[in-house]
Image (cartoon, rainbow, N blue to C red):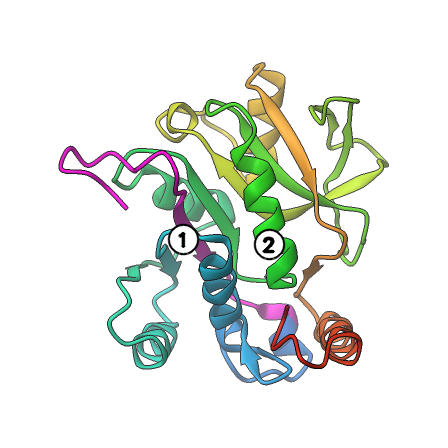
Amino acid sequence: MTGGDGIAHADRLLGGVIAAGEGSRLRRDGFAAHKPLVEIAGVPLIERVLENFDAGGVAPPLVIVNEDERDCVERVRARFPGRPVEFIVKTTASSLESFRLVTAAPPRGRMLVSTVDAWCRAVDFAAFVEAAMRRPSDAVVLAVTPFVADEKPLWVDLDGDGRVSTLGGARGAFVTAGLYVVPESVRRATPPSGLGRLREYLGWLHRSGHAMYGEVIPTVVDVDRAEDVAIAEALERDAAIANPAGGRNR
C-alpha cells in the first residue's frame, strides 16, 4: 500500500517473489511443471507463497519469472482475478540478479522477498512477519530455521538479541529459509561487482556492518528435489491431522 508520494505505508511490508529459477533438479526427478507450478498437496508453490503473503498482511507482490514460465503468470491471474500482483518476465543469470531486479523496483519502503520454493505454514509465515516488523526499520531480517532440508545450506548463528553473529560458516544452529526483509537503504545500495549468488550478497551485507537479525521459523522446506516435495506433503498431512478444522496450511 502506498501513499501519493509512492512511499509504502509503514504498517505494511511490500512484497517480492523470486520465481525465475529453472527447477532443473525437479525436472530430473520427473516433475514436468515449471517450478512455481510444482504442487505440494495439490497447491502450486506460487499460490502457497501468495496465500502466505495474505496471511502475513504483506502487500500483493512483484514476482519475477523466467521467459519460459509465462504459464505461471496466466495461472496466477486466473486463480487470483483482480489481485494487483505484478510480474517481471525475464530470464536471469542468478538468484542474485532476480533479487536485485525485484528489490530495485518502486515503490520505496521495506520489502519482504520470498523465494518461490520456501514452503512453510501460513501461521509460521505470519509470525515471522510480525517478529520482523518489531526489528529496527533499517535492519535486514532473515528467516532462519533449525530444519535442514537443503543440499547446500547457508548456516547462521544468532546472538542473544537475535542479531546474526555468523553467516556462511561450516556449521551453525540454523540455516537461512528463503525469506528476507530488506529495508529501503539496502534496496538502493550498490553491491560490489563480482558477487554471483544471493548468499554472497548476504555475506557482503553482513561483513559491511549492516544491521542483520534472524527470526526463527520452526520448519521451512527448500523445495528443490522430489524428496523435498515428499517432506513438505508429509508435514502438510501432519498439520491437517493435528488441526482438522484449521483449514489448509494453518
Task: In the rendered view, tell whether residue 140 sits above or below residue 41.
Answer: above
Seen at 51% across and 38% down, the residue is 181
Q: Which numbered disc covers residue 241?
A: none
Amino acid under disc 2: Phe
Residue located at (32% from left, 37% from top): 104
Q: Nearer the viewer, residue 45 or 247?
A: 247
Q: Earlier in the sequence, mark 1 or mark 2?
A: 1
Against 14, residue 172 (above or below) is above
Q: Is residue 18 left or right of residue 244?
A: left
Label 2 CA crowd tier, 10 Å (few <14, some 14–19, many 20+): many
Query: What residue range appears in magenta?
Result: 1-25
The residue at 13%/37% (across/down) is 4
Of discs 1 and 2, which sits in the foreground?
A: 2
Q: Is residue 207 left or right of residue 70?
A: right
Please give the label number shown on residue 92: 1
Residue lying at the far top in this picture: please name it: 209
Which of the labelled discs sits on residue 125, or is there none?
Answer: 2
x, y (%) of residue 58? 42, 51
Q: Is residue 177 left or right of residue 138?
A: right
| Label 2: which secondary element | helix
The front one of 115 and 52 is 52
**Above or below — where is 167 with respect to 68?**
above
For the residue marked with disc 1, what is the amino acid?
A: Thr
